[in-house]
Image (cartoon, rainbow, N blue to C red):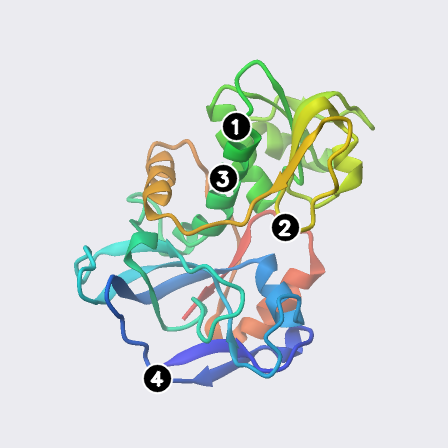
């Protein structure tokens, strides 16, 4: 099968498509025939060597939508089921940017019923990160929440999920994205250097400038492990390290099926054009995810 890997760190030119053996599922694992897999900023970080692994062959890709192709012992899935899953881990020999991938059975959920695989593939990583970040913040209706990077994939899911919970959301985004973030459920755009928020979800990875917008005794959650600013003024600071959770992913799928969550695709690329997709990601300005199709 074909798979997208890096063997040396660098820019988009470091991305390779190689031929490798089809992986076999072990106990409590399933093999998925990949229909679509999302390209995320974390893949660019892996490619650049941010997470280490020098000298190894590292597979790229965390999100997948496809069909169960084979099951290991005690894996409660049936061959032929259409599913989505998150394959956690920055340094792994094979990722989801491949024709087949093996994942733990408890990381899998049934695919949304009303969307195609390309759109379904954009759900697992970013939506799980968003909901897990909101859980860490413990923000409740009646409190004020600022979401930075609100027009991005993770930020957009966070806006929608928070609004669905009845939380008043202020979005930090470009003025040109106001209609977009309002359509996702934001009440308004942040006004200049406005502060005093009960909580901030820093999807744009602003760090200290985002922390300054939190009231004394509030809460801040970042989206990169180890990158959050130090606590100050009684503000509780933490960050998510997204975890694969099939049960939680199934809840998010239900919200897609109910029309609560919108899945946004910017562009699609073939697996063989993975390096071109990385180059497009590096250009920025996307309002939706890039998706690879084998």
In the rendered image of this protein, does residue 198 appear above or below residue 153? above
Q: Are discs 2 and 3 less than 8 Å apart at CB?
A: no
Residue drawn at x 42%, y 60% is 87
Residue 224 drawn at (x, y percent): 63, 50
Q: Element under label 4? A: loop
Other residues around mark 4 within 10 Å, as few (<14) / some (14–19) / many (≥20): few
- Where is 210 relative to 38, above or below? above
Most extreme residue toward the right is 193
Mark earlier in primary sequence (1, 2) = 1
**Residue at (60%, 17%) from the top-left corner?**
143
Left of 230 or right of it: where is 184? Answer: left
Q: Can residue 204 be seen in this view?
A: yes
Q: Earlier in the sequence, mark 1 or mark 3?
A: 3
Q: Where is residue 66, by image quadrant?
A: bottom left
Mark 1 → mark 4, Cα distance in angstroms: 42 Å
Q: Where is residue 72 in the image (x, y as percent from the top left)?
A: 21, 67
SS under mark 1: helix
User: Quadrant of the rendered structure where residue 144 is?
Assistant: top right
Q: Nearer the viewer, mark 2 or mark 4?
A: 2
Q: Which numbered disc, 1 or 4, marks the residue that appears first in the sequence? A: 4
Can you identify the residue that label 2 sits on? 224
Q: Residue at x 26, y 55 (%)?
A: 82
Q: Is residue 98 left or right of residue 250?
A: right
The residue that disc 1 covers is 162
Residue indicated by mark 3: 132
- Tell me which label, 2 or 4, sits earlier in the chain: 4
- The CA span between labels 4 and 3 is 34 Å
Mark 4 touches mark 3? (CB < 8 Å): no
Q: Nearer the viewer, residue 161 or 238?
A: 238
Circle count:
4
The residue at which mark 4 appears reads as 21
- Measured in 3D between alpha carbons, the distance from the residue under mark 1 to the one under mark 2, in whole angstroms, is 20 Å
């Amino acid at each position: 099968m074909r798979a997208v890997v890096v063997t040396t760190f660098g820019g988009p030119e470091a991305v390779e498509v190689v031929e490798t053996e089809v992986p076999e599922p072990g106990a409590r694992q399933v093999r998925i025939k990949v229909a679509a897999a999302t390209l995320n900023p974390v893949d660019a970080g892996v490619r650049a060597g941010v997470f280490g692994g020098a000298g190894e062959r590292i597979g790229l890709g965390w999100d997948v939508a496809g069909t169960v192709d084979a099951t290991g012992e005690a894996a409660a899935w049936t061959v032929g089921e259409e599913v989505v899953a998150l394959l956690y881990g920055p340094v792994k020999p094979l990722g989801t940017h491949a024709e087949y991938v093996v994942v733990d059975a408890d990381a899998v959920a049934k695919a949304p019923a009303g969307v195609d695989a390309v759109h379904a593939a954009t759900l697992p990583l970013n939506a799980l990160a968003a909901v897990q970040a909101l859980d860490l913040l413990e923000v409740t209706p009646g409190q004020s929440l600022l979401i930075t990077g609100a027009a991005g994939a993770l930020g957009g899911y966070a806006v929608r999920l928070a609004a669905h919970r009845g939380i008043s959301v202020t979005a930090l985004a470009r003025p040109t994205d106001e209609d977009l973030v309002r359509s996702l459920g934001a009440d308004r755009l942040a006004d200049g250097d406005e502060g005093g928020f009960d909580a901030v979800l820093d999807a744009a990875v602003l760090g200290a400038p985002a922390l300054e917008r939190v009231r004394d005794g509030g809460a801040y959650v970042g989206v990169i492990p180890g990158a959050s600013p130090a606590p100050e003024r009684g503000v509780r600071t933490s960050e998510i390290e997204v975890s694969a959770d099939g049960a939680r992913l199934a809840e998010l799928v239900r919200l897609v099926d109910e029309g609560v969550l919108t899945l946004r695709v910017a562009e699609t690329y073939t697996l063989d054009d993975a390096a071109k997709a990385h180059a497009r990601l590096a250009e920025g300005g996307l309002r939706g995810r890039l998706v690879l199709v084998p």
